[in-house]
Image (cartoon, grey):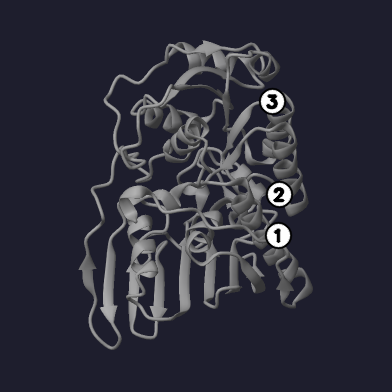
């Protein structure tokens, strides 16, 4: 499959590059979103797909004029594939990414990259050893609303930012997803936490300390077809994060309260001189409001109109993949770095450890925040 629509300036109007030949491993629901998003970008030539279940790869690929590989091993043996997009279930990411890197492939992985920092750090080291690139979702910090927010922060319009409220009230997954169990097995903290954390870390840099309280609010759940199951991890997490650069952030992850509640999945930034409200940490078309201290909020115009959005999620799934592909051709750092993803995993694992210990935990890792997109400088 090659893109049929004109190239956009999502990455700032970079010079045309030779398309990167890519293939997907993991042909579940999220693969459809990636496929549709990638059709907008000639920088990535998506040519094939594989799955642990060969029939899933055949069904997915034949509907989209892609090559169905008999197995992930067959895909990795194809020397023409430069970039693998790992869209397997979250529990398989570490193994699949490791096998791709060992085969000498550049990799873009869905989140989370791993379930512990040690595994993520090993993948980062393996990519360096093999001389290939490793990137990871979420790339939502590259969205129009998120890049607009980052620019406001860089310009110092809020004064010194001391406090952030970040909310993820994701509702009860079983009410809308046909197979909710994997979300709860991964844990909503690891599944949804990367969105606000990556948005914050991309502006403020590394987190240095976390304190936590968590609970299981609704232990017994029921799928839409009537099957009951128990959730193995907390569906409510309240964490206090201290960034090395100074701000404190209150992070709430909830799989009980409806996502239509007023806090929703919003982020509030509070500084000495002003505050900034963003209606959603993940949607590229989120609304933004600015308020000088002790005054009312007024709308902030996005730096540009959001492009190529999934109509349901408000995201462009391809953005991180395309940035990686262009970075491969231009020889520059890609923005959704594995180092940042590994740090986010370190923070998430530290949150779990702090909850177990009932005490603050120091976060070990650091990373360099990504450069803003050219249209957001």
Name the one closer to the observer, 330 or 173.
Answer: 330
Name the one closer to the observer, 8 or 248.
Answer: 8
Q: Is residue 303 visible?
A: yes
- The C terminus is located in which quarter? bottom left
In screen coordinates, is 291 left or right of 343?
A: left
Residue at the disc numbered 1: 349
Residue at the disc numbered 2: 115
What residue do we see at 44% from left, 53% from top?
141
* Sequence-first tag of 3 and 1: 3
What residue do we see at 38% from left, 28% from top?
36
Quarter holding residue 157: bottom left
Find the distance from the CA under tag 3 to the CA under tag 1: 29 Å
* Sequence-first tag of 1 and 2: 2
How far across and how far down the image is residue 349, in percent?
70, 60
How far across and how far down the image is residue 304, in percent?
24, 50
What residue do we see at 57% from left, 33% from top?
87
How far across and how far down the image is residue 370, in percent?
50, 53
Disc 2 secondary structure class:
loop
Q: Examine the rendered structure and indicate whether residue 91 appears above or below residue 268.
A: above
């Amino acid at each position: 499959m090659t893109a049929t629509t004109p190239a956009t300036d999502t990455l700032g109007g970079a010079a045309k590059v030779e398309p990167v030949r890519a293939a997907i491993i993991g042909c579940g629901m999220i693969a459809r979103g990636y496929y549709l998003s990638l059709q907008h970008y000639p920088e990535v030539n998506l040519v094939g797909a594989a799955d642990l279940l060969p029939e899933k790869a055949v069904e997915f690929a034949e509907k989209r004029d892609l090559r169905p590989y008999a197995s992930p091993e067959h895909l990795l043996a194809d020397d023409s594939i430069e970039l693998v997009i790992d869209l397997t279930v979250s529990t398989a990411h570490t193994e699949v990414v490791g096998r791709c890197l060992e085969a000498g492939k550049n990799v873009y992985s869905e989140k989370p990259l791993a379930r512990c920092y040690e595994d993520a750090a090993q993948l980062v080291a393996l990519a360096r050893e093999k001389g290939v690139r490793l990137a990871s979702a979420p790339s939502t910090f590259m969205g129009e609303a998120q890049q607009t927010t980052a620019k406001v922060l860089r310009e110092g319009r809020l004064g010194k930012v001391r406090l952030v409220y970040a909310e993820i009230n994701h509702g009860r997954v079983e009410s809308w997803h046909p197979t909710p169990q994997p979300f709860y097995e991964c844990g909503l903290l690891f599944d949804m936490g990367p969105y606000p954390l990556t948005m914050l870390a991309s502006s403020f840099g590394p987190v240095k300390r976390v304190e936590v309280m968590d609970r299981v609010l609704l232990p017994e759940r029921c799928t839409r077809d009537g099957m009951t199951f128990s959730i193995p991890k907390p569906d409510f997490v309240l964490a206090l994060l201290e960034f090395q650069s100074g701000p404190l952030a209150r992070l709430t992850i909830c799989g009980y309260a409806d996502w239509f509640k007023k806090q929703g999945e919003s982020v509030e930034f509070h500084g000495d001189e002003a505050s900034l409200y963003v209606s959603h940490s993940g949607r590229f078309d989120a609304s933004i409001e600015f308020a000088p201290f002790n005054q009312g909020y007024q709308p902030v115009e996005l730096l540009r109109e959001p492009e190529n959005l999934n109509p349901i999620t408000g995201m462009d799934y391809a953005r991180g993949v395309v940035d990686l592909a262009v970075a491969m051709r231009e020889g520059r750092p890609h923005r959704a770095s594995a180092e940042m993803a590994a740090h986010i995993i370190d923070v998430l694992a530290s949150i779990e450890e702090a909850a177990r210990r009932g005490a603050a935990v120091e976060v070990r890792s650091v990373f360099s925040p990504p450069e803003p997109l050219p249209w957001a400088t």
